[in-house]
Amino acid sequence: MLKKAEWRNPWLWVPSLYYAEGIPYVMVMTVSVAFYKRMDVSNKEIAFYTSLLYFPWVLKPLWSPIVDIIKTKRLWIILMQLLVTAGLAGVAFTAVLPDFFLYTMLCFSLIALCSATHDIAADGFYMLGLDSSRQAFYVGIRSTFYRLAMATAGLVLIIAGYYENKSSIPAAWNVTFIFITILFLLFFIYHNFILPYPKNDKPAHESEKHFFSVFIKVFEEFFKKKKIGSAIAFLLIYRFGEAQLVKLAQPFLLDPKNIGGLGLTTAEVGFAYGTLGVGALALGGILGGITISRKGFKKLIWWMFAAINLPHILYIYLAFFQPDNYFLITLCVAGEQFGYGFGFAGYLLFMIFISEGEFKTSHYALCTGFMALSMMIPGAFSGIIEEFLGYKLFFIWILITLIPGYFIIRTLPIDPEFGKKAE
């Protein structure tokens, strides 16, 4: 039996904690799309209802102070991992029911709520469990393992595709979600024993007395920041095209060619995203961070905005030419993922920049709320737009939506030295 150590080697828990943090997010945001597509739910319904699952991430700043005030971050992490495990099990066993859509959506909603709360607790625990120098050292590690969790989506789709060939589609997804439930249960058990007990991980009793006044001040200080209107507009518009693409990319790859898709199997889509796709995403993110540290954020923001939007041209190519070459299709997926990873590094850094100040943690949580909103709103209506335009015009449309962002970027108050490594 492990003792309740105040400190443990971060390699024992930082990688696993952030890998576990990414799994429920990718199940809700990525795997659910493929699952409902294979269960013959329409693109319009898939895009709309799975986009609503962003709500917990949009609203999590509202209850982030509760995580600070009640109990410890460690307890919140363990409790949320247990509830996520229950939610995944719920998806597994309701996928085979006649009313699967209602029940699985309820389970995905539970997973989303617990995952958003887990994010708050894990980020807070990271700052409590490590000193400032180790926080800086392990920030790349935590980011990398969070991105590696994205590869789990590819693995899940490969497993689902394998069992689809051996049984019915509902039964295949039942087995697949049982697998991911067991995997997450192992993370819950492991973290219950291995997470340290930092001395300063305790309820913020002092803040409890002035909860409402502090809560209001957090919001007041955030909205008093210089050019905050431009900053919020940037957070909402930066990924406008990507928010629409992410909801329809998998349905496009899975749909038969006679209705505009590429006719890939579930396993082929999983392999494309889980191999070259996730590798390109991680590489793009790493290169984005390194480049910013050398050149500074202000010099690179235009290039990063272009990187996250211009690769949508690859989907225009796929929609118009519908190639049969699977390796070529995978390269296009990887190219789009690389651009997203490179460009998203700039988005994350901008959130850190705008969060500077007395309430850094709460203001960063507010930024992540706007980040989730930027994905939820465009994603919710993307299915309606695609069904009206068809895949070809839809991908042209999302490329055009990058235009407003260029005007917004010109108004941002970015320090030229921000993000640049000191010589």
Image: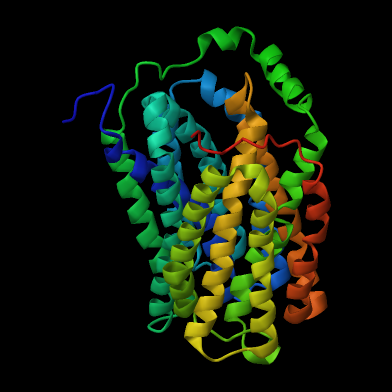
Q: Position of residue 256 (x, y in %)?
A: 62, 87
The residue sitting at 54% across, 52% down in the picture is 288
Quadrant placement of the N terminus: top left
Residue 247 lies left or right of residue 325; in this view the side is: right
Q: Is residue 21 left or right of residue 208?
A: left
Where does the image place residue 327, in percent across and percent down from the top left?
A: 47, 84
Q: Where is residue 44 in the image (x, y as percent from the top left)?
A: 73, 69
Colouring method of the image: rainbow
Residue 171 visible in rendering = no
Foreground: 209 or 284?
284
In the image, residue 115 sits, relative to residue 148, either above or below, namely: above
Outermost residue, front side: 423
Measuring from the top left, give residue 351's x and y in whole percent.
63, 38
* Residue at the image point whose x is 58% and y is 11% from the top: 208
On screen, 79 above or below 332? above
Q: Is 315 placed above or below 402 here?
A: below
Q: Residue at x 45, y 20 (%)?
A: 71
Please tell me which residue lies in front, 317 or 409.
409
- 205 over 107 or under it: above or below: above
x 38%, y 78%: residue: 162
Most extreme residue toward the left is 1
For residue 138, say whether it is visible: yes
Corner quadrant of residue 195:
top left
Is 79 on the left or on the right of 383, as rendered?
left
The part of the image, by quadrant, that contains residue 141 is top left
